[in-house]
Image: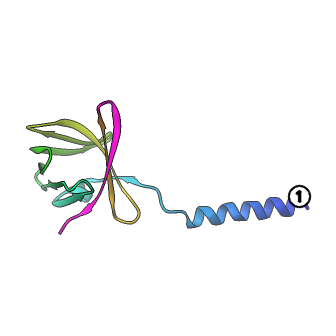
Amino acid sequence: MRLQFAVAGLGCCLALVAVSPARATPVSVSDLSGKKFCWNDGGTENYSADGKYVSTHDGRGTWTVTDKGVDIRTNQITGLADMQKLADGTFTSTWIVDGKPKTWTGRYCN
C-alpha cells in the first residue's frame, strides 16, 4: 500500500514538473543584437549589432554580453545587467539600485 502511494506521489510530482513553465535563460548576443526593447517603465533600449547602445533612460554607449551578464557603459551609467529570456519570449533585466535588486520586464518592440 505504501508503495502505491509513493508511486502515485512520484507521478504527481513528475506531472507538475512537466507542465511547469521553463526556466529563464541568460540572454545571448543574438537575443540582443539589432533589437529594440520596450520595458514596463516606458523606457526603450536599442542594442545595435555593432555594440552601440541607446536608452531613453540611460543615454548612449556600448554593450557586450559577458559570462556574468550584459555589460552596459553609457555617458550616464556603467553596470552589469542580469538579463534573462523567459519561455514566453519576454525578458527581465535586473540591476542593483541603491543596494537592492530591481527588476524590469520587457519585450521586443516593433
Q: Is 103 in the magenta?
A: yes
Residue lying farthest to the right in this orientation: 1
Image spot of residue 10 (x, y percent): 73, 60
Image spot of residue 39 (x, y percent): 24, 56
Residue 61 shows up from this direction: no
Instruction: Name the side, left or right, on which 24 lies relative to 37.
Output: right
Could you say which quadrant of the image residue 110 lies in? bottom left
Above or below residue 79? Residue 1 is below
Above or below residue 70? Residue 1 is below
Instruction: Name the side, left or right, on which 100 lies relative to 22.
Output: left
Q: Residue at x 29, y 31 (%)?
A: 98
Could you say which quadrant of the image residue 105 lies in? bottom left
Q: Residue at x 46, y 56 (%)?
A: 23
Residue 93 shows up from this direction: yes
Residue position for label 1: 2
**Amino acid at dot 1:** Arg
Q: Depth check: 29 or 39 in front?
A: 39
Segment tinted magenta in the rendering: 98-110
Number of numbered labels in the structure image: 1
Image spot of residue 84 (x, y percent): 35, 52
Residue lying farthest to the front in this orientation: 41
